[in-house]
Image: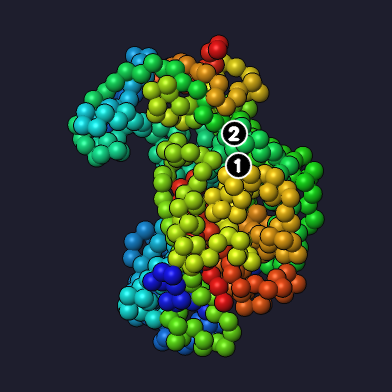
Protein backbone atom coordinates (compact mmCIF):
# COMPACT_ATOMS: atom_id res chain seq x y z
CA UNK A 1 0.00 0.00 0.00
CA UNK A 2 1.27 3.42 -0.91
CA UNK A 3 1.13 6.74 0.89
CA UNK A 4 -1.76 7.88 -1.28
CA UNK A 5 -3.89 4.77 -0.76
CA UNK A 6 -7.19 5.95 0.76
CA UNK A 7 -5.65 9.39 1.38
CA UNK A 8 -8.55 10.85 -0.60
CA UNK A 9 -11.59 9.88 -2.65
CA UNK A 10 -13.49 11.15 -5.66
CA UNK A 11 -16.76 12.10 -3.99
CA UNK A 12 -18.71 14.46 -6.23
CA UNK A 13 -19.15 14.42 -9.99
CA UNK A 14 -20.89 16.57 -12.58
CA UNK A 15 -20.85 16.09 -16.31
CA UNK A 16 -22.50 17.67 -19.33
CA UNK A 17 -24.14 15.60 -22.01
CA UNK A 18 -21.80 15.99 -25.00
CA UNK A 19 -23.27 17.94 -27.90
CA UNK A 20 -22.33 18.32 -31.55
CA UNK A 21 -23.42 21.97 -31.58
CA UNK A 22 -21.60 24.33 -29.26
CA UNK A 23 -23.61 25.61 -26.28
CA UNK A 24 -24.20 29.38 -26.05
CA UNK A 25 -22.10 29.77 -22.90
CA UNK A 26 -18.37 30.26 -22.66
CA UNK A 27 -16.19 27.63 -21.04
CA UNK A 28 -15.76 29.56 -17.79
CA UNK A 29 -19.54 29.81 -17.36
CA UNK A 30 -19.94 26.10 -18.05
CA UNK A 31 -17.17 25.37 -15.54
CA UNK A 32 -18.97 27.42 -12.90
CA UNK A 33 -22.20 25.45 -13.23
CA UNK A 34 -20.29 22.16 -13.29
CA UNK A 35 -18.45 23.27 -10.13
CA UNK A 36 -21.72 24.02 -8.36
CA UNK A 37 -23.14 20.62 -9.30
CA UNK A 38 -20.01 18.65 -8.38
CA UNK A 39 -19.75 20.32 -4.97
CA UNK A 40 -23.43 19.62 -4.32
CA UNK A 41 -23.01 16.02 -5.47
CA UNK A 42 -20.13 15.65 -2.99
CA UNK A 43 -22.44 16.88 -0.22
CA UNK A 44 -20.00 19.69 0.49
CA UNK A 45 -20.45 23.42 0.88
CA UNK A 46 -18.91 26.12 -1.26
CA UNK A 47 -16.45 27.07 1.49
CA UNK A 48 -15.28 23.48 1.96
CA UNK A 49 -13.41 23.76 -1.34
CA UNK A 50 -9.82 24.83 -0.70
CA UNK A 51 -8.09 23.33 -3.73
CA UNK A 52 -8.55 23.91 -7.47
CA UNK A 53 -7.14 22.07 -10.49
CA UNK A 54 -8.09 23.32 -13.93
CA UNK A 55 -7.43 23.16 -17.62
CA UNK A 56 -7.14 26.73 -18.90
CA UNK A 57 -9.96 27.92 -21.16
CA UNK A 58 -10.75 30.86 -23.34
CA UNK A 59 -7.29 30.89 -24.88
CA UNK A 60 -5.58 31.77 -21.59
CA UNK A 61 -2.16 30.24 -21.07
CA UNK A 62 -1.39 31.87 -17.73
CA UNK A 63 -3.26 32.92 -14.59
CA UNK A 64 -6.37 30.85 -15.30
CA UNK A 65 -6.47 29.03 -11.92
CA UNK A 66 -6.75 32.33 -10.03
CA UNK A 67 -9.27 33.70 -12.53
CA UNK A 68 -11.54 30.69 -12.11
CA UNK A 69 -11.09 30.81 -8.33
CA UNK A 70 -12.15 34.46 -8.39
CA UNK A 71 -15.12 33.70 -10.67
CA UNK A 72 -16.24 30.91 -8.32
CA UNK A 73 -15.62 32.99 -5.19
CA UNK A 74 -13.03 30.50 -3.94
CA UNK A 75 -9.89 31.36 -1.99
CA UNK A 76 -7.94 28.11 -2.30
CA UNK A 77 -4.72 27.18 -0.52
CA UNK A 78 -3.73 25.05 -3.53
CA UNK A 79 -4.36 25.89 -7.20
CA UNK A 80 -2.75 24.76 -10.42
CA UNK A 81 -3.29 23.94 -14.05
CA UNK A 82 -2.42 20.50 -15.38
CA UNK A 83 -1.42 19.63 -18.94
CA UNK A 84 -0.93 15.98 -19.73
CA UNK A 85 -3.15 16.07 -22.81
CA UNK A 86 -5.76 13.34 -22.51
CA UNK A 87 -4.10 12.09 -19.32
CA UNK A 88 -4.87 15.38 -17.56
CA UNK A 89 -8.03 14.24 -15.76
CA UNK A 90 -6.42 11.11 -14.29
CA UNK A 91 -3.29 13.11 -13.49
CA UNK A 92 -5.39 15.62 -11.57
CA UNK A 93 -6.86 12.94 -9.29
CA UNK A 94 -3.57 11.83 -7.80
CA UNK A 95 -2.17 15.37 -7.70
CA UNK A 96 -5.22 16.41 -5.67
CA UNK A 97 -4.77 13.42 -3.37
CA UNK A 98 -1.08 14.24 -2.94
CA UNK A 99 -1.88 17.84 -2.02
CA UNK A 100 -4.43 16.58 0.51
CA UNK A 101 -1.97 14.01 1.90
CA UNK A 102 0.61 16.79 2.25
CA UNK A 103 -1.84 18.77 4.35
CA UNK A 104 -2.13 21.71 1.95
CA UNK A 105 -5.88 21.39 1.40
CA UNK A 106 -8.84 19.10 2.11
CA UNK A 107 -11.20 19.29 -0.85
CA UNK A 108 -9.97 19.85 -4.40
CA UNK A 109 -12.33 20.85 -7.21
CA UNK A 110 -11.13 19.58 -10.59
CA UNK A 111 -12.84 21.09 -13.62
CA UNK A 112 -12.52 21.19 -17.40
CA UNK A 113 -14.80 22.16 -20.26
CA UNK A 114 -14.57 22.43 -24.01
CA UNK A 115 -16.78 24.49 -26.29
CA UNK A 116 -16.12 23.36 -29.80
CA UNK A 117 -17.59 24.71 -33.00
CA UNK A 118 -17.19 21.83 -35.50
CA UNK A 119 -16.87 24.18 -38.49
CA UNK A 120 -14.20 26.26 -36.75
CA UNK A 121 -12.42 23.07 -35.64
CA UNK A 122 -12.37 21.77 -39.21
CA UNK A 123 -10.99 25.07 -40.51
CA UNK A 124 -8.28 25.18 -37.85
CA UNK A 125 -7.45 21.50 -38.41
CA UNK A 126 -6.94 22.17 -42.11
CA UNK A 127 -5.02 25.41 -41.77
CA UNK A 128 -2.68 23.93 -39.18
CA UNK A 129 -2.33 20.59 -40.91
CA UNK A 130 -4.09 18.78 -38.09
CA UNK A 131 -2.16 20.40 -35.31
CA UNK A 132 0.72 22.09 -37.04
CA UNK A 133 2.99 24.14 -34.88
CA UNK A 134 0.76 23.71 -31.84
CA UNK A 135 1.19 19.97 -31.88
CA UNK A 136 4.51 18.25 -31.98
CA UNK A 137 7.83 19.36 -33.37
CA UNK A 138 6.39 20.80 -36.56
CA UNK A 139 9.68 21.73 -38.20
CA UNK A 140 10.45 18.06 -38.87
CA UNK A 141 6.89 16.84 -39.42
CA UNK A 142 4.44 19.33 -40.98
CA UNK A 143 5.99 19.25 -44.44
CA UNK A 144 5.27 15.52 -44.74
CA UNK A 145 1.50 15.97 -44.34
CA UNK A 146 0.61 14.18 -41.09
CA UNK A 147 -3.10 14.04 -40.27
CA UNK A 148 -2.76 15.38 -36.76
CA UNK A 149 -2.48 12.69 -34.13
CA UNK A 150 -4.70 10.43 -36.28
CA UNK A 151 -1.68 9.36 -38.30
CA UNK A 152 0.32 8.60 -35.16
CA UNK A 153 -2.25 6.13 -33.86
CA UNK A 154 -2.61 4.68 -37.35
CA UNK A 155 1.13 4.03 -37.43
CA UNK A 156 0.99 2.36 -34.01
CA UNK A 157 -1.85 0.15 -35.22
CA UNK A 158 0.04 -0.69 -38.41
CA UNK A 159 3.16 -1.79 -36.54
CA UNK A 160 1.06 -3.82 -34.07
CA UNK A 161 -0.63 -5.59 -36.98
CA UNK A 162 2.75 -6.27 -38.58
CA UNK A 163 4.40 -7.58 -35.41
CA UNK A 164 1.52 -9.46 -33.79
CA UNK A 165 -0.95 -10.19 -36.59
CA UNK A 166 -3.70 -8.01 -35.10
CA UNK A 167 -6.64 -7.55 -37.48
CA UNK A 168 -9.07 -4.74 -38.29
CA UNK A 169 -11.95 -7.00 -37.21
CA UNK A 170 -10.37 -7.40 -33.75
CA UNK A 171 -9.95 -3.63 -33.38
CA UNK A 172 -13.52 -3.12 -34.61
CA UNK A 173 -14.81 -5.41 -31.84
CA UNK A 174 -13.72 -2.75 -29.31
CA UNK A 175 -15.81 -0.04 -31.04
CA UNK A 176 -18.78 -2.41 -31.31
CA UNK A 177 -18.81 -3.52 -27.66
CA UNK A 178 -18.40 0.08 -26.51
CA UNK A 179 -21.32 1.05 -28.74
CA UNK A 180 -23.43 -1.60 -27.02
CA UNK A 181 -22.49 0.08 -23.74
CA UNK A 182 -23.38 3.52 -25.11
CA UNK A 183 -26.84 2.26 -26.07
CA UNK A 184 -27.44 1.88 -22.32
CA UNK A 185 -26.16 5.38 -21.56
CA UNK A 186 -28.66 8.20 -22.21
CA UNK A 187 -25.78 10.73 -22.16
CA UNK A 188 -23.87 9.10 -25.02
CA UNK A 189 -23.80 10.88 -28.40
CA UNK A 190 -23.78 7.75 -30.56
CA UNK A 191 -26.39 5.16 -29.63
CA UNK A 192 -27.30 3.46 -32.91
CA UNK A 193 -26.37 -0.24 -33.13
CA UNK A 194 -23.00 -0.91 -34.76
CA UNK A 195 -21.55 -4.12 -36.19
CA UNK A 196 -18.01 -5.26 -36.91
CA UNK A 197 -18.87 -5.34 -40.63
CA UNK A 198 -20.04 -1.71 -40.48
CA UNK A 199 -16.82 -0.64 -38.76
CA UNK A 200 -14.45 -2.34 -41.21
CA UNK A 201 -16.50 -1.30 -44.24
CA UNK A 202 -16.69 2.35 -43.18
CA UNK A 203 -14.40 4.94 -44.72
CA UNK A 204 -10.70 4.28 -44.17
CA UNK A 205 -9.68 7.68 -42.83
CA UNK A 206 -6.07 6.97 -42.03
CA UNK A 207 -4.95 3.47 -42.88
CA UNK A 208 -5.57 1.09 -41.08
CA UNK A 209 -8.08 3.07 -38.97
CA UNK A 210 -11.70 3.41 -40.10
CA UNK A 211 -14.20 6.17 -39.30
CA UNK A 212 -15.76 4.52 -36.22
CA UNK A 213 -12.33 3.77 -34.74
CA UNK A 214 -11.58 7.48 -34.33
CA UNK A 215 -13.12 9.86 -31.78
CA UNK A 216 -15.19 12.71 -33.09
CA UNK A 217 -14.97 16.12 -31.41
CA UNK A 218 -17.87 17.72 -29.55
CA UNK A 219 -18.62 20.14 -26.72
CA UNK A 220 -18.93 19.22 -23.07
CA UNK A 221 -17.29 19.33 -19.69
CA UNK A 222 -16.88 17.65 -16.35
CA UNK A 223 -16.06 18.51 -12.76
CA UNK A 224 -15.33 16.36 -9.75
CA UNK A 225 -14.25 16.77 -6.16
CA UNK A 226 -11.34 14.92 -4.57
CA UNK A 227 -11.81 15.07 -0.80
CA UNK A 228 -9.97 14.10 2.38
CA UNK A 229 -11.33 11.03 4.25
CA UNK A 230 -13.33 13.04 6.79
CA UNK A 231 -15.11 14.96 4.00
CA UNK A 232 -15.51 11.96 1.70
CA UNK A 233 -18.56 10.62 3.50
CA UNK A 234 -20.49 13.91 3.43
CA UNK A 235 -22.96 12.82 0.74
CA UNK A 236 -23.76 9.46 2.35
CA UNK A 237 -22.83 7.52 -0.78
CA UNK A 238 -19.88 5.16 -1.32
CA UNK A 239 -16.78 7.25 -2.08
CA UNK A 240 -14.51 6.19 -4.92
CA UNK A 241 -11.29 5.88 -2.94
CA UNK A 242 -7.98 6.42 -4.63
CA UNK A 243 -6.14 3.14 -4.02
CA UNK A 244 -3.25 3.49 -6.44
CA UNK A 245 -1.81 5.89 -9.00
CA UNK A 246 1.03 5.92 -11.48
CA UNK A 247 2.27 8.19 -14.24
CA UNK A 248 4.83 7.90 -17.03
CA UNK A 249 5.88 10.08 -19.96
CA UNK A 250 8.29 8.75 -22.58
CA UNK A 251 8.05 11.15 -25.52
CA UNK A 252 5.86 13.72 -27.25
CA UNK A 253 6.20 13.06 -30.99
CA UNK A 254 5.56 9.46 -32.00
CA UNK A 255 8.88 9.39 -33.84
CA UNK A 256 10.59 9.60 -30.44
CA UNK A 257 8.59 6.71 -28.95
CA UNK A 258 10.98 3.88 -28.08
CA UNK A 259 8.45 1.31 -29.35
CA UNK A 260 5.13 2.39 -30.88
CA UNK A 261 3.46 -0.90 -29.89
CA UNK A 262 4.39 -0.52 -26.21
CA UNK A 263 2.95 2.48 -24.36
CA UNK A 264 4.11 4.01 -21.07
CA UNK A 265 1.00 2.38 -19.55
CA UNK A 266 3.44 -0.48 -18.79
CA UNK A 267 5.02 1.70 -16.11
CA UNK A 268 2.04 3.86 -15.04
CA UNK A 269 -0.27 0.86 -14.52
CA UNK A 270 2.38 -1.23 -12.75
CA UNK A 271 2.91 1.62 -10.31
CA UNK A 272 -0.83 2.07 -9.75
CA UNK A 273 -1.48 -1.65 -9.21
CA UNK A 274 1.52 -1.98 -6.85
CA UNK A 275 0.36 0.98 -4.77
CA UNK A 276 -3.16 -0.43 -4.57
CA UNK A 277 -1.91 -3.94 -3.81
CA UNK A 278 -4.16 -5.47 -6.49
CA UNK A 279 -3.68 -7.05 -9.92
CA UNK A 280 -5.59 -6.75 -13.22
CA UNK A 281 -7.41 -10.00 -12.35
CA UNK A 282 -9.04 -8.19 -9.40
CA UNK A 283 -10.50 -5.37 -11.54
CA UNK A 284 -14.28 -5.19 -12.09
CA UNK A 285 -14.37 -2.19 -14.46
CA UNK A 286 -11.80 -1.12 -17.04
CA UNK A 287 -12.35 2.58 -17.80
CA UNK A 288 -9.56 3.58 -20.14
CA UNK A 289 -8.81 6.33 -22.64
CA UNK A 290 -10.03 5.39 -26.10
CA UNK A 291 -9.23 8.14 -28.58
CA UNK A 292 -8.81 5.27 -31.07
CA UNK A 293 -9.62 1.54 -30.91
CA UNK A 294 -5.91 0.71 -30.94
CA UNK A 295 -5.41 2.66 -27.70
CA UNK A 296 -7.80 0.37 -25.80
CA UNK A 297 -6.03 -2.70 -27.14
CA UNK A 298 -2.58 -1.34 -26.24
CA UNK A 299 -3.79 -0.33 -22.76
CA UNK A 300 -5.24 -3.80 -22.05
CA UNK A 301 -1.91 -5.35 -23.03
CA UNK A 302 0.34 -2.86 -21.30
CA UNK A 303 -1.66 -2.76 -18.06
CA UNK A 304 -1.37 -6.56 -17.91
CA UNK A 305 -4.92 -7.68 -18.67
CA UNK A 306 -3.43 -9.92 -21.37
CA UNK A 307 0.11 -10.68 -22.61
CA UNK A 308 1.89 -8.29 -25.00
CA UNK A 309 0.72 -8.90 -28.53
CA UNK A 310 -2.29 -10.99 -27.49
CA UNK A 311 -4.70 -8.03 -27.42
CA UNK A 312 -6.37 -8.86 -30.74
CA UNK A 313 -7.53 -12.38 -29.83
CA UNK A 314 -8.18 -11.16 -26.26
CA UNK A 315 -10.74 -8.52 -27.25
CA UNK A 316 -12.31 -10.92 -29.75
CA UNK A 317 -12.70 -13.64 -27.10
CA UNK A 318 -13.99 -11.44 -24.26
CA UNK A 319 -17.29 -9.61 -23.96
CA UNK A 320 -16.34 -6.00 -23.19
CA UNK A 321 -19.92 -4.85 -22.56
CA UNK A 322 -21.50 -4.08 -19.20
CA UNK A 323 -23.04 -7.57 -19.34
CA UNK A 324 -19.74 -9.20 -20.23
CA UNK A 325 -16.83 -10.93 -18.51
CA UNK A 326 -14.51 -7.91 -18.79
CA UNK A 327 -16.53 -4.66 -18.83
CA UNK A 328 -14.57 -1.93 -20.64
CA UNK A 329 -15.75 1.68 -20.90
CA UNK A 330 -19.31 0.98 -19.82
CA UNK A 331 -20.30 4.59 -20.63
CA UNK A 332 -19.53 3.89 -24.28
CA UNK A 333 -16.01 5.21 -24.22
CA UNK A 334 -15.17 8.45 -25.95
CA UNK A 335 -15.68 6.66 -29.27
CA UNK A 336 -19.43 6.50 -28.58
CA UNK A 337 -19.95 8.87 -25.62
CA UNK A 338 -18.13 11.67 -27.45
CA UNK A 339 -14.84 13.44 -26.92
CA UNK A 340 -15.58 16.89 -25.52
CA UNK A 341 -12.01 18.06 -25.95
CA UNK A 342 -9.83 17.69 -22.91
CA UNK A 343 -12.89 16.77 -20.81
CA UNK A 344 -13.17 13.49 -22.72
CA UNK A 345 -10.59 12.02 -20.40
CA UNK A 346 -12.76 12.90 -17.40
CA UNK A 347 -15.57 10.63 -18.63
CA UNK A 348 -13.51 7.58 -17.64
CA UNK A 349 -13.38 8.89 -14.05
CA UNK A 350 -17.04 9.92 -13.79
CA UNK A 351 -18.12 6.49 -15.09
CA UNK A 352 -15.88 4.70 -12.60
CA UNK A 353 -17.43 6.76 -9.78
CA UNK A 354 -20.98 5.92 -10.97
CA UNK A 355 -20.21 2.21 -11.19
CA UNK A 356 -18.50 2.12 -7.77
CA UNK A 357 -21.47 3.96 -6.25
CA UNK A 358 -23.96 1.66 -7.94
CA UNK A 359 -25.54 4.56 -9.82
CA UNK A 360 -24.92 3.50 -13.45
CA UNK A 361 -28.54 2.62 -14.20
CA UNK A 362 -29.22 0.09 -16.94
CA UNK A 363 -25.50 -0.55 -17.43
CA UNK A 364 -24.72 -1.00 -13.72
CA UNK A 365 -22.30 -3.86 -13.05
CA UNK A 366 -23.53 -6.46 -10.59
CA UNK A 367 -20.63 -6.11 -8.20
CA UNK A 368 -18.23 -3.27 -8.90
CA UNK A 369 -15.62 -2.84 -6.19
CA UNK A 370 -12.47 -2.02 -8.14
CA UNK A 371 -12.01 0.14 -11.23
CA UNK A 372 -8.91 0.65 -13.35
CA UNK A 373 -8.82 4.10 -14.95
CA UNK A 374 -6.28 5.21 -17.53
CA UNK A 375 -5.68 8.58 -19.13
CA UNK A 376 -3.61 8.83 -22.29
CA UNK A 377 -2.20 11.99 -23.81
CA UNK A 378 -0.64 13.04 -27.09
CA UNK A 379 0.71 10.14 -29.11
CA UNK A 380 0.66 7.39 -26.46
CA UNK A 381 3.15 9.66 -24.75
CA UNK A 382 1.64 10.73 -21.40
CA UNK A 383 -0.04 8.07 -19.28
CA UNK A 384 -1.75 8.41 -15.90
CA UNK A 385 -3.25 5.27 -14.32
CA UNK A 386 -5.53 5.01 -11.29
CA UNK A 387 -7.03 2.23 -9.24
CA UNK A 388 -10.26 3.42 -7.63
CA UNK A 389 -12.25 1.32 -5.19
CA UNK A 390 -15.02 1.24 -2.63
CA UNK B 1 -7.42 27.26 -59.04
CA UNK B 2 -5.18 28.60 -56.32
CA UNK B 3 -2.42 26.36 -55.12
CA UNK B 4 -1.87 26.18 -51.40
CA UNK B 5 1.78 25.91 -50.43
CA UNK B 6 2.89 22.98 -48.32
CA UNK B 7 4.20 23.89 -44.88
CA UNK B 8 7.95 24.26 -45.14
CA UNK B 9 10.49 23.76 -42.36
CA UNK B 10 11.50 26.98 -40.62
CA UNK B 11 15.14 26.29 -39.81
CA UNK B 12 16.52 27.52 -36.49
CA UNK B 13 20.13 28.20 -35.49
CA UNK B 14 20.27 24.64 -34.17
CA UNK B 15 18.72 22.92 -37.19
CA UNK B 16 20.17 25.02 -40.02
CA UNK B 17 23.08 22.60 -40.74
CA UNK B 18 20.57 19.72 -41.12
CA UNK B 19 18.58 21.62 -43.77
CA UNK B 20 21.72 23.00 -45.42
CA UNK B 21 23.04 19.45 -45.80
CA UNK B 22 19.69 18.34 -47.24
CA UNK B 23 20.09 21.13 -49.80
CA UNK B 24 23.37 19.43 -50.79
CA UNK B 25 21.57 16.06 -50.88
CA UNK B 26 23.30 14.80 -47.76
CA UNK B 27 21.44 13.38 -44.75
CA UNK B 28 23.16 14.31 -41.49
CA UNK B 29 22.50 13.94 -37.78
CA UNK B 30 24.13 15.30 -34.64
CA UNK B 31 26.45 12.94 -32.75
CA UNK B 32 27.33 13.62 -29.12
CA UNK B 33 31.09 13.88 -28.64
CA UNK B 34 30.65 13.05 -24.98
CA UNK B 35 28.53 9.85 -25.02
CA UNK B 36 28.64 9.10 -28.78
CA UNK B 37 24.83 9.04 -29.14
CA UNK B 38 23.60 9.75 -32.65
CA UNK B 39 20.16 11.34 -32.72
CA UNK B 40 17.40 13.04 -34.67
CA UNK B 41 15.72 15.52 -34.67
CA UNK B 42 18.57 17.99 -34.12
CA UNK B 43 18.60 19.52 -30.65
CA UNK B 44 20.81 21.93 -28.72
CA UNK B 45 21.59 19.17 -26.23
CA UNK B 46 22.19 15.42 -26.47
CA UNK B 47 18.99 13.62 -25.34
CA UNK B 48 21.09 10.88 -23.71
CA UNK B 49 23.42 13.00 -21.56
CA UNK B 50 22.51 16.68 -22.17
CA UNK B 51 25.98 17.48 -23.46
CA UNK B 52 26.19 20.47 -25.80
CA UNK B 53 29.40 19.10 -27.35
CA UNK B 54 27.88 17.90 -30.62
CA UNK B 55 29.18 17.18 -34.09
CA UNK B 56 27.40 16.62 -37.41
CA UNK B 57 27.80 13.21 -39.01
CA UNK B 58 26.80 12.14 -42.50
CA UNK B 59 24.48 9.14 -42.65
CA UNK B 60 24.19 6.38 -45.25
CA UNK B 61 20.66 7.41 -46.14
CA UNK B 62 19.59 3.78 -45.93
CA UNK B 63 17.06 2.37 -43.53
CA UNK B 64 13.78 0.51 -43.26
CA UNK B 65 10.14 1.44 -42.86
CA UNK B 66 9.49 1.09 -39.12
CA UNK B 67 5.81 1.87 -39.55
CA UNK B 68 3.58 3.85 -41.89
CA UNK B 69 0.09 4.94 -42.73
CA UNK B 70 -1.57 5.73 -46.02
CA UNK B 71 -3.20 9.14 -45.64
CA UNK B 72 -6.47 9.07 -47.56
CA UNK B 73 -7.96 12.33 -46.34
CA UNK B 74 -5.61 15.32 -46.25
CA UNK B 75 -5.64 17.35 -43.06
CA UNK B 76 -4.00 20.29 -44.82
CA UNK B 77 -5.33 21.61 -48.16
CA UNK B 78 -1.85 21.57 -49.69
CA UNK B 79 -1.94 17.77 -49.61
CA UNK B 80 -5.40 17.32 -51.14
CA UNK B 81 -4.06 16.34 -54.56
CA UNK B 82 -1.45 14.02 -53.05
CA UNK B 83 -3.85 11.54 -51.43
CA UNK B 84 -3.38 8.67 -51.04
CA UNK B 85 0.19 9.17 -49.87
CA UNK B 86 2.48 7.33 -47.47
CA UNK B 87 3.48 8.92 -44.18
CA UNK B 88 6.12 6.79 -42.50
CA UNK B 89 8.61 6.55 -39.68
CA UNK B 90 11.89 5.37 -41.18
CA UNK B 91 14.52 3.84 -38.94
CA UNK B 92 17.93 4.57 -40.41
CA UNK B 93 20.62 1.88 -40.48
CA UNK B 94 22.57 4.05 -38.00
CA UNK B 95 19.63 3.99 -35.54
CA UNK B 96 17.80 7.34 -35.48
CA UNK B 97 14.23 7.54 -36.75
CA UNK B 98 12.51 10.31 -38.67
CA UNK B 99 9.03 11.07 -39.89
CA UNK B 100 8.97 11.22 -43.68
CA UNK B 101 7.15 10.19 -46.85
CA UNK B 102 7.79 7.03 -48.82
CA UNK B 103 7.51 8.01 -52.48
CA UNK B 104 8.18 6.54 -55.90
CA UNK B 105 5.96 3.50 -55.40
CA UNK B 106 2.34 2.42 -55.14
CA UNK B 107 1.20 3.12 -51.54
CA UNK B 108 -0.38 -0.34 -51.50
CA UNK B 109 3.08 -1.90 -51.86
CA UNK B 110 4.65 -0.33 -48.78
CA UNK B 111 5.36 -2.73 -45.90
CA UNK B 112 6.80 -2.50 -42.41
CA UNK B 113 10.53 -3.37 -42.40
CA UNK B 114 10.80 -2.64 -46.13
CA UNK B 115 14.31 -1.37 -47.08
CA UNK B 116 14.35 2.24 -48.25
CA UNK B 117 16.87 4.90 -49.22
CA UNK B 118 16.82 8.67 -49.01
CA UNK B 119 15.84 10.86 -51.94
CA UNK B 120 15.75 14.63 -51.73
CA UNK B 121 12.69 16.66 -52.65
CA UNK B 122 13.83 20.00 -54.06
CA UNK B 123 10.39 21.19 -55.11
CA UNK B 124 9.83 23.52 -52.13
CA UNK B 125 11.88 26.42 -50.84
CA UNK B 126 13.66 24.02 -48.45
CA UNK B 127 14.98 20.65 -49.65
CA UNK B 128 13.48 17.87 -47.56
CA UNK B 129 14.58 14.23 -47.24
CA UNK B 130 12.09 11.58 -48.35
CA UNK B 131 12.55 7.86 -48.95
CA UNK B 132 11.94 5.35 -51.73
CA UNK B 133 12.00 1.56 -51.72
CA UNK B 134 15.21 -0.26 -52.66
CA UNK B 135 15.56 -3.84 -53.80
CA UNK B 136 16.40 -6.44 -51.16
Q: Is residue B13 visible?
A: no
Taking the spot 49% from the left edge, 86% from the top edge, the residue there is A44
Of A219 and A229, the residue lying toward us: A229
Q: Is residue B42 visible?
A: yes
Q: Please give left or right for residue A171 compared with residue A108 in the image.
A: right
Cα distance in 3D space between marks 1 and 2: 8 Å
Locate the N terminus of chain B by quadrant: top right
Helix, strand or loop at label 1? It is: loop
The quarter of the picture where residue B96 lies is: top left
Callout 1 touching callout 2 (CB < 8 Å): yes
When the figure is inspected, residue B111 is found, relative to residue A14, above or below; the finding is: above
Mark found first going from the N terminus, 1 or 2: 2
Of A215 and B7, the residue lying toward us: A215
Residue A210, position as x, y percentages in the image: 68, 41
Color theme of the render? rainbow
Of B35 and A278, the residue lying toward us: A278
Q: Please give left or right for residue A95 compared with residue A260 in the image.
A: left
Of A359 and A145, the residue lying toward us: A359
The quarter of the picture where residue A59 lies is: bottom left
Q: Please give left or right for residue B45 compared with residue A49 in the image.
A: left
When the figure is inspected, residue A334 is found, relative to residue A199, above or below; the finding is: below
Residue A382, position as x, y percentages in the image: 45, 52
Residue A138, position as x, y percentages in the image: 41, 37
Residue bearing mark 1: A309
Residue bearing mark 2: A163
Taking the spot 43% from the left edge, 23% from the top edge, the residue there is B92
Taking the spot 63% from the left edge, 27% from the top edge, the residue there is B84
Tell if the residue under mark 1 belongs to the same chain as the one under mark 2. yes
Q: Please give left or right for residue A116 compared with residue A187 in the image.
A: left
Amino acid sequence: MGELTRAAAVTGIAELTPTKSPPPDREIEIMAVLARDAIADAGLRHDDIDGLLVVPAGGMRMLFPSLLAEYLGLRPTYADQVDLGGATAAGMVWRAAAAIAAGQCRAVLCVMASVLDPARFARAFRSEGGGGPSLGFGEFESTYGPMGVNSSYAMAARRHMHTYGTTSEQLAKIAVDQRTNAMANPMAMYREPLTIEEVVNARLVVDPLHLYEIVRPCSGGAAWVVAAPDLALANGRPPAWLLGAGEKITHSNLVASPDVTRTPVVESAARAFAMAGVTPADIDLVSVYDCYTIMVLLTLEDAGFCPKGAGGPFVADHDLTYAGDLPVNTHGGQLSFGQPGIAGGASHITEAVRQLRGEAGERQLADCELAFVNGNGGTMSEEASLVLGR
Amino acid sequence: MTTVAKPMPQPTAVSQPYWDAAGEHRLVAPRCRSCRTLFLYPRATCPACLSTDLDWEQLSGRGRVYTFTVVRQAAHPAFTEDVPYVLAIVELDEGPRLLTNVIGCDPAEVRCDQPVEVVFDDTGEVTVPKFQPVAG
